[in-house]
Amino acid sequence: MPVIDVLVPVLNRPANAARVANSLRDSTTAAELLFVCSPRDEAEIDACRMVAETLVVGWEPGPGDYARKIQFGYDNTDEPLVLLAADDLRFRPGWLEAVLAAAEYDAGVIGTNDLANPSVLRGSHSTHPVVRRCYIDQRGGVVGQPGQVYFEGYDHQCVDSELCATAIARGCYYHAFDAVIEHLHPLWGTAENGATYEKSRRRTREDQRLFDSRRFLWEREAVPA
């Protein structure tokens, strides 16, 4: 029986669908994979449907698309744990066992180890975290928005940063160093660049400025040290 939903928003990278699905299934039989596609992205939709359950959203892929697709997937699943994933991941054996061990600490957000991002390697951030559904439903990944996973006002960057920073401020974050889910990305030299990556980076500076302007939201929720 599944114990975790794995949400994978996708856009115009059909070659990745089978690879990420096979990697996940080679690592565990207890995860339910869901692809979330854009309309008219026919090659992607076909590739995803060949290997896993697939939903197609009703909007075109504009600003905030990843966060919106995560929310769509979240609202259409029901397992108590949810991995906020992508199609450029490689799942290492034992990742889910490490997540389940971390879940014993009742953290709302559990960080996984992508083997690349310096903040992730320090244990202060996660590019593809696991969220506990009861935490999202009751408190929200966004301050003041119970039921909301990611803030959808970013173009793409910083959605994970805000989720993790908010959980850390609340004392609700636990980093599972042994939950290794490698992020294959051009920035780390482990993936080829392409249009989808370029789209994700087009407004990085604007996203960072927006993130900085919103810091007061989670800082005011900080628990005493």
Image (cartoon, rainbow, N blue to C red):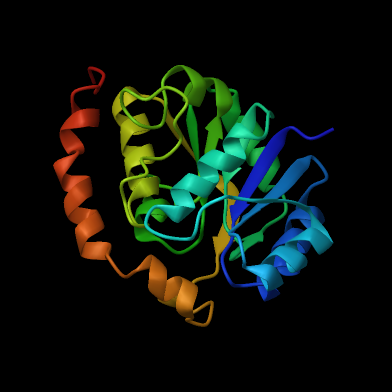
Residue 13 visible in the picture: yes
Instruction: Say above or below: 71 vs 167.
Output: below
Which residue: 31% across, 38% down? 165
Residue 106 visible in the picture: no
Residue 2 in the figure: left or right of residue 118? right
| Image coords of residue 212 (percent x, y) | 17, 46
| Image coords of residue 163 (percent x, y) | 38, 38
Residue 178 in the figure: left or right of residue 46? left
Residue 33 in the figure: left or right of residue 64? right
Instruction: Say above or below: 93 vs 100.
Output: below
Q: Quadrant of residue 16?
A: bottom right
Q: Quadrant of residue 38?
A: bottom right
Instruction: Say above or below: 178 vs 110.
Output: below
Instruction: Say above or below: 178 vs 157.
Output: above
Q: Quadrant of residue 155?
A: bottom left
| Image coords of residue 161 (percent x, y) | 34, 46
The quarter in which the C terminus is drawn is top left
The quarter in which the N terminus is drawn is top right
The total number of labels drawn is: 0
* Viewer-proximal residue among 97 and 134: 134
| Image coords of residue 105 (percent x, y) | 53, 23
Which residue: 75% across, 42% down? 31
* Viewer-proximal residue among 91 and 53: 53
* Viewer-proximal residue among 61 and 34: 61
Which residue: 55% across, 28% down? 132
